[in-house]
Amino acid sequence: MSGIRIRGTGCSLPRQTVTNQDLSRMVETSDEWIYARTGIRERRRCVEESQCELALNAARAALEMAGASPADIGVCLVPTITPDYITPSTACMLQKELGMPEDTVCFDLSAACSGFVFGLHTAQALLAYSRRKYGLIVCSEVLSRITDYTDRGTCILFGDGAGAAVVEYSDRYAPMPSVLGARGDRESLYAPGIDRGEPPVLHMGGTQVFKFAVETVPECIRALLDRAGLTPEDVDQFVFHQANRRILERVMKKMGIPEEKVWMNMEHYGNVSSASTAIALDDAVRAGRLAPGQKALCCAFGGGLTWAGALVELA
């Protein structure tokens, strides 16, 4: 059996930074209150940039690191919940802008904050049937479009940005172990769709989501390591969805994972939904925390409710 490894990563961020002090002028909050509860100090917000522009820039950065060209790509996936258009998909627009072959499999994928890991799993499956053995996964989100800036329970959390990865499928690589799951839930975390009679903004039950995350993420990690026949000590870096520092601290305590093995960057970007894990992975790679041959355990959770974990290796 064949599998994938990551050849390159990239990210793209809007120019505007929104600090906790900025938010304190919009709603009743403070830098101290936000940071103590979330670990977030600032996030990015699109003013002129589009979701597709962010995706395009992140994709180019990942292709450059991978030493790959658009002509090498057999599968292009864009996990997102905030596309510029309902149709065409952002993936199809990337195919045109990058000049990928017309027989490239292109589509957007909706798994909320778990989208990057769902994308890795899906790319591995599809590349088995592609003539070209490189895949491009680009998570791009403009959550400011669906954020209610009068609701201090949600507006402090979310930011905009894009993260990307180029993967290579080869019989030289073992299959990437992954664990995916879903639990239908329309109440804990949702944004209404078209003509639902209410503003299309994010609604979240913070207590329910926190409880879901601290229970599900350790279970996902255990199942993934068991499937791979590994222990936490065998993992070089844990790269989680960057939703909340308190959630990750609870997970680390439950699993006995030392903090130096967990990459965290929510302080600077906030929660960027599907792009969060991809941006964190790119940061870790560019900071030298992950090198070729090393293993990263990526784990995410989000609306759906969904959760996903994958043990990825750098080529």
Image (cartoon, rainbow, N blue to C red):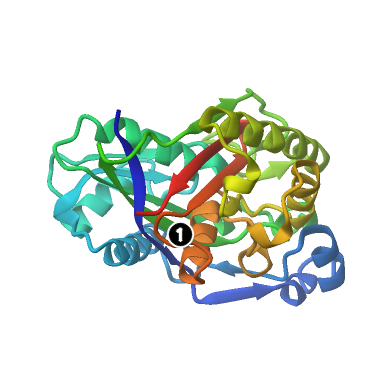
Q: Disc 1 marks which amino acid? A: Ala
Nearest the camera: 34 or 233?
233
Q: Horizontal placement of 242 versus 298: left or right?
A: right
Of the 4 image quadrants, the one containing the N terminus is top left
157 above or below 82? below
Which residue is rendered at x = 29% and y = 61% of the image? 66
Q: Position of residue 8 (x, y in %)?
A: 35, 59
Q: Position of residue 221 (x, y in %)?
A: 63, 37
74 above or below 52? above
Nearest the camera: 251 or 222?
222
Q: How many marks?
A: 1
Q: Position of residue 113 (x, y in %)?
A: 57, 44
Which residue is rendered at x = 41% and y = 41% of the image? 120
Nearest the camera: 228 or 148?
228
Nearest the camera: 92 or 87?
92
Which residue is rendered at x = 60% and y = 37% of the image? 192
21 above or below 96? below
Q: Horizontal placement of 140 versus 127: left or right?
A: right
Q: Position of residue 68 (x, y in %)?
A: 21, 59
One can see residue 80 in this view: no
4 above or below 63? above
What kind of element bears circle 1? strand
- Judged from this view, the residue extending furthest toward the top is 184
Residue on which the image places disc 1: 162
One can see residue 5 in this view: yes
Q: Determine crowd level at label 1: few under 14, some 14-19, many 20+ residues with C-alpha closer than 10 A.
A: many
Of the 4 image quadrants, the one containing the C terminus is bottom left
Q: Horizontal placement of 237 versus 134: left or right?
A: right
